[in-house]
Image (cartoon, helix red, strand yellow):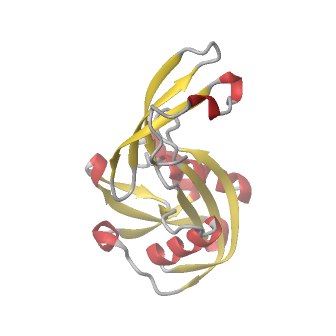
Amino acid sequence: MSEDRSEAEDRSSHAAGPGGFRMLGEKIVYRGSLISVAHAIFADPEGREFRRDVVHHPGAVSVVPVIDEGSAVLMVRQYRAPVDRELLEIPAGKRDVDGEPVELTARRELEEEVGMRAGRLERLAEFYNSPGFCDEHSFVFMALDLEPCASSAQGVEEQHMTIERISFDEVPGLIATGSLVDAKSLIGLSLARVALGS
């Protein structure tokens, strides 16, 4: 969708979506280094207009790095400024390179964050993180047959993060105690356990 689209545009050009809903137009009101925010106008199946604030995000990838013959994974513990706390997570990153295939982004993030190169990469799922207000579209992979390589921390948070070995048997307890609360990690670890039959 064009970033310059405004509410004054011809609204008849937008095709109806599922269930007869249509986006009529949007106006970008904020543009940051990662996200942009738009005031958008939609029409419901009866033609009534309604407005929503929409956050546009380039998307993300995450990776479950499997080690120890499928019994454990490598995770990172890093500070997350929006929630003002450190979180235990699987390696992840933004899709901030135009045209880069998601598999390549996943490999790059794995190498940068935990210094591992994947011999095999299997896509586990794709999902929308918070579709009630944001269009962020994420992909999660499982990395197998890992080999050490040089890491390259990007940004101040990554420069201070730590890498931890977590066994799959620990995961239910970490969730139950609130020690593992990151959504992409919950999705990736749960699907990796199923894929590995553990």
Q: x and y percent of residue 15 in the render?
A: 68, 33
Between 71 and 120, the one nearer to me in the picture: 120
Q: Is residue 197 visible?
A: no
The picture quadrant where one finds residue 189 is bottom right
Q: Relative to 99, say whether 20 is above or below.
A: above
In the image, is 169 to the left or to the right of 19? left
Quadrant containing the C terminus in the rendered view = bottom right
- Residue 109 pos. (x, y %): 50, 71
Q: Nearer the viewer, residue 21 or 103?
A: 21
Question: Residue, x 28% and y 70% (percent of image)?
Answer: 156
Give left or right: position of 20 versus 73: right
Please give the name of the residue rendered at 54% of the width and 67% of the height, measured from the top-left corner: 98
Position in image of residue 85 (x %, y %): 28, 51
- In the displayed orientation, state which residue is furthest to the left: 84
Q: Is residue 182 visible?
A: yes
Determine whether, in the image, residue 65 is placed left or right of residue 33: right
Q: Residue 148 is drawn in which quadrant?
A: bottom right
